[in-house]
Image: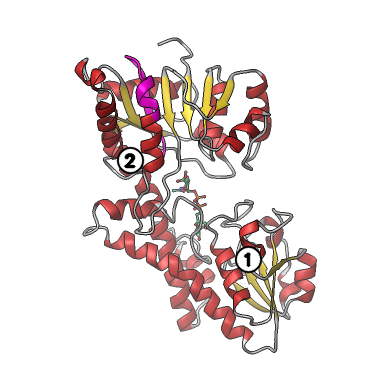
Amino acid sequence: MPAFPKICILGLGYIGLPTAAVFARSGFQVHGVDVNPATVETIRTGKAHIVEVDLDGLVQAVTSSGRLTVSTEVEAADIFIVAVPTPLTEQNTADLQAVANAVEQIAPCIERGNLIIIESTVPPGTTDAMCALINDKRPDLKASGDVGVSYHAAHCPERVLPGRILIELIQNDRIIGGVTEICGEKAQALYDQVIQGACYQTNARTAELAKLTENAFRDVNIAFANELSLICDAVDVDVWDLIALANKHPRVNILQPGPGVGGHCIAVDPWFIAERAPEHANLISLARTINDKKPQAIIDKVEALARRFKSPTIACLGLAFKANVDDLRASPAVTIASTLASKALGKVIAVEPHIDTLPEDIKGAGIELVSLEHALTESDIIVTLADHRAFKKIPAAKVAEKSVVDTRGIWR
Ligand code: SAJ
């Protein structure tokens, strides 16, 4: 393989585009592929189609230098990286169609010695299944030695935090799950050229489960905090004081309760474990259920409060799924605000400093986007849903006269 082999990355979303741009910046010739022509067109003009710190400038630099090219078609390359989404089906299982489609597109292009990396989050056994798919499509490869000899394959899960993607892509350690030992070595040689973190070798199945385990660990721990918050309400204890005190113990580190778990990772990945071992994933499944029920508990609490007023103005502070991001997708805050609006309890207003207008899908939900000042002046009830920096600066005295449901412990 040349010093800077050519890379073809399939999927130019939150992981694929930053990954493509980072490899291109390091000197690799990268071709990015996406099924969405609008995405491809935006990137071709040097812009990122997603909001991520510093990504716009980097995409501009690597497209104008010609290091990153994009299209809707796969190109021949030395290395193929699959970074397509793996959404949750209605049955709470992984929808692997996009991964299978990507692998089917790659199959005809594979040449002897190529490396195929799956970065998408997948249930254990998927990388092996994708190799079987390649073997079906390319019996000639199997005849000349199969995976590990005629081509190489590995699962190398991404572990970056939205909002810090470009930093964490370089700094985080990586798990390298080779289908064979030599596959793992080939994959590590690639990441060693761009990342500063350590690479840890294992097999593909362990790498797949490790990624899911990291997010399930966090989900279970958030569920513990969310359950505590309900217990505290029932026995009239301040959950924030309770957790702060319990965390003084040297071996206790409880996470923070909130309005529920949002985003596309922590609220999804634990199900991929449950899918493969349903009879054993009891705690993991229960944690998912506890976290999924949390928005309803907040809705009930606000509704009970609102019934004490005659047509109150309810201000929801924050619509994003977590602090200091503009991402409203899969956000429990949006579920809570729009459900409250649908109940016609009064007027529902919302403050989200990271957006200028409400996204199309919640425009008709009956929520009015207002300034923070307006919300603080006009509201009867305040519901904190994201602990954005701007909200943490609000002095408790400013909300002292209001009825407050503080799901994020801003004024604890
Ligand atoms: N949350 C709480 N309480 C907490 C921590 C988080 O309620 O104490 C909520 C947040 O408000 C949010 C959700 O959990 O709604 C998830 O937020 P997050 O910041 O914990 O994680 P994500 O989904 O943005 O990113 C996670 C990260 N995984 C871990 O920290 C183990 C990231 O490193 C992964 O790369 C990412 O998932 C992914 O792509 O899988």
How many neighbours does mark 1 have within 10 angstroms: few (below 14), some (14-19), or many (20 or more)?
some
Amino acid found under the numbered disc labelled 1: Ile
* Position above or below: 112 against 89: above
| Residue 17 sits in quarter | top right
Which residue lies most toward the top here? 2
Q: Quadrant of the N terminus?
A: top left
CA–CA distance in space, label 1 to label 2: 36 Å
Q: Residue at position x 46%, y 25% from top?
A: 74
In-front residue for pair 246/308: 308
Q: Residue at position x 26%, y 51% from top?
A: 276
Residue highlighted by disc 2: 208
In-front residue for pair 24/396: 24
**For residue 410, which numbered disc appears in the image?**
1
Please indicate whether residue 32 sits to the left or right of residue 181 in the image: right
User: Per the image, is 115 magenta?
Assistant: yes
In-front residue for pair 160/395: 160
* Position above or below: 65 against 222: above
As helix, strand or loop, the secondary structure at mark 2 comes to helix
Q: Find the magenta span and give its range.
A: 105-121
* Position above or below: 228 against 119: below
* Position above or below: 361 against 2: below
| Residue 44 sits in quarter | top right
